[in-house]
Amino acid sequence: MTINVLMFYLLSAVILVFSVLTITTGKMLRAAVYLLFVLVGTAGLYFLLNYQFLAAVQLILYAGGIVVLIIFSILLTSHISHKFAKPAAWKLWMGFIVLIVGSSTVLWVLLSHHFERAASVTPITVNMHVIGEQLLGMGKNGYVLPFELISILLLAAMVAAIVIAKKEKNQN
């Protein structure tokens, strides 16, 4: 077994374990921290596939930005000790049924499909200068303006969510 295969299994196990912990934990702050481990594990898989750019985006944007924003929101709204209520028994059974049906469908598709190695595929040359210009450009194929608009929208939504959460707390 090579080191790449070993790292794949290790990262897959980390992602699976912390994904289950994220949805089964009773505390909100722990769920956010477990989500952070899932996103870091996903970035590790991107590194294994030699997709360094996607791994960096995963770490910076999701693990570094979104999860930190979620944790700050939890801390700012004083819901750090909030515990989720236990779901009803029928919801657990329905979730288990969906798990079995979904897993069996995925396994059936994977086992019934014959995967073949692709014929000689020529790699596409990547010009990092062109990618950088498109990410930072405001002209044709530029992504700065949509990125800034989405960031302002997310900031407004987060401020509104905090105001609503603080208002509900004060009314109780």
Image (cartoon, helix red, strand yellow):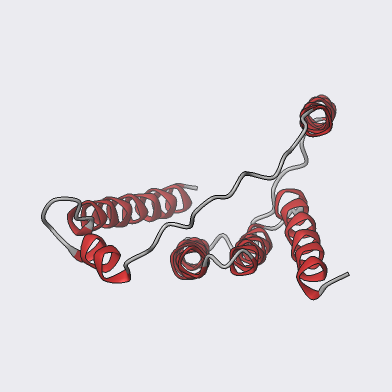
**Residue sitting at x 19%, y 55%:** 142
Q: Residue 10's spot in the image, x, y percent?
A: 80, 67
Q: Residue 87's spot in the image, x, y percent?
A: 76, 36
Q: Residue furthest bottom?
A: 3
Would residue 161 appear left or right of 6 to someone viewing this image? left
Q: Residue furthest right?
A: 1
**Residue sitting at x 52%, y 62%:** 74
**Residue sitting at x 66%, y 58%:** 31
Q: Residue 119's spot in the image, x, y percent?
A: 61, 44
Given residues 151 and 122, the one toward you in this image is: 122
Residue 106, above or below 144: above
Given residues 77 and 64, the one toward you in this image is: 64
Which of the 4 image quadrants contains residue 46? bottom right
> Disc count in the image?
0
Given residues 166 and 128, the one toward you in this image is: 128
Which of the 4 image quadrants contains residue 110? top right
Location of the N terminus by quadrant is bottom right
Q: Residue 147's spot in the image, x, y percent?
A: 26, 56
**Residue sitting at x 74%, y 65%:** 11
Would residue 163 appear left or right of 32 to someone viewing this image? left
Residue 49, above or below 26: below
Q: Residue furthest left?
A: 139
